[in-house]
Image (cartoon, rainbow, N blue to C red):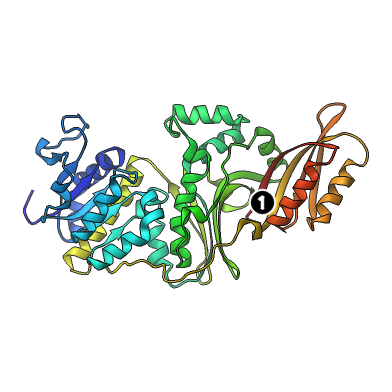
Amino acid sequence: MSDDNLKIGLLGLGTVGRGVYRIITGNSESIKRKIGAGIEVKRILVRDTAKDRGLDLNPAVFTTNPEDIISDPEIRIVVEVMGGLEPTLDYVVRALKNGKSVVTANKDMIASHGKMLFEIAEANNADLLFEASVAGGIPIIRPLKQCLAGNRLSQIIGIVNGTTNYMLTKMTREGSDFNEALQEAQSLGYAEADPTADIGGFDAARKLAILASIAFNSRVLPDDIYVEGITKITAADIAYASELNYIVKLLAIAKETEAGIEARVHPSLIPLDHPLAAVNDVYNAIYVSGDAVGDTMFYGRGAGEMPTASAVTADIMDAARDLLRNVQGIISCTCFEEKPVKSMQEVACKYYVRLQVADKPGVLASIAYAFGDKDVSLASVLQKQTDLATAEIVVVTHTVREGNMQDALKIINHLSSVSAVSNVIRVEGE
């Protein structure tokens, strides 16, 4: 390729890295016309230079030495698609300190160390771009930072983990239990051998930390977020939700209130007519509310080689435009405020509660009294007989503070007529 091309280096050539290379080479002429220069992948950091990666590449492009990219003055943009924190964070810090713009898909690094990285980028007149860190190919970081920048955003509610959304879709459509849905997700490659980050809600929490920080202009860290996964969701809960005109989704929720920022990830019942209710399988969607724009939703594939590579390539093109016009470093950190993050105990919402109780007179009255004593008002009640001695009760509450709800459940757990509180799921989107 010509020496006039803008040269980049890839840290990693896994699934996403291969996708980036395919887009850059396959759409090279279109990219050149759009940004005003060609893009050349000069070096690629890999562990094994002899491994066949299914790409038509000159072996001289590969290196096992990160300095061949980080310290090469010809390489203007470093593209980090390795993942993880070590040694990735060190590579990115050094690249930024060398004045190189960095494009990354690394949600862990941005969620936990974004503030530091932005400070280094600004001090060295470099871009730090991370569109692919949340929701794969769905444009959401750039819309929040730029397209919706004139709005005061009030909430973000998202389905941002494809694995759990696939599992819940399968459980809803086929009546599968949790383990069956997980095994199928793993067999299809949607879930890792160790699925904890997905099913535990931690992957979604890291993504929410990034979205909430941008939306509300205040740093929200993963440790600030209340996290609850889908491991307790059963086919019975999904069936009851349907009977009540809801569907169960794992939601990442951030809201700005007068008392501070709410940031939480947990399973939720949402009404069947809510836009997020129709987001199924491995698709992601982020529902955003602003004072000027109203309600908007961003929908698409939240992971995978080419969708994620699409977002990475768009960031490379933006960084290239900035370099060609000598305006790099203008997309700075937007966390210029310091707002408190509310304790989960202070959050208020509606609740679905499923109980196993003795099938005898007065039981429902005692449960209702325990709820009422803690200012928990019931909106609806379902009762199903499971055998001659036992019944299953499902209640949906009106909006109540989390602390009051937990206090009521402590009392109900100790009632002699209640054998188990089988599940508690929050209700959102009404």
Which residue is depicted at the point 37% across and 56% down? 113
Estimate the x, y position of residue 24 in percent, counting from the top left. 21, 47
Amino acid type of disc 1?
A: Val
Rendering coords of residue 372 (x, y %): 83, 55
Q: Position of residue 214 (x, y in %)?
A: 43, 63
Of all residues, the one furthest to the right in this rendering is 361
Left or right of 128 on screen, residue 212 = right
Name the residue nearer the viewer: 81 or 109.
109
User: Is residue 350 left or right of 139 when viewed as pictured?
Assistant: right
Quadrant assignment, res 404 = bottom right
Name the residue located 42 percent from the left edge and 31 percent from the top edge. 189
Residue farthest left in this picture: 3
Judged left or right of residue 408, residue 48 is left
Residue identifier under label 1: 427
**In the rendering, at what x and y percent does residue 248 appear?**
62, 43
Along the viewing direction, whichever of 59 and 175 lies nearer the viewer: 59
Q: 221 above or below 182? A: below
Quadrant location, the C terminus: bottom right
**Can I make out residue 187 in this image?**
yes
Badge 1, how many Cα within 10 Å: few under 14, some, many 20+? many
* Callout 1: SS: strand
Locate residue 187: give its quadrant. top left
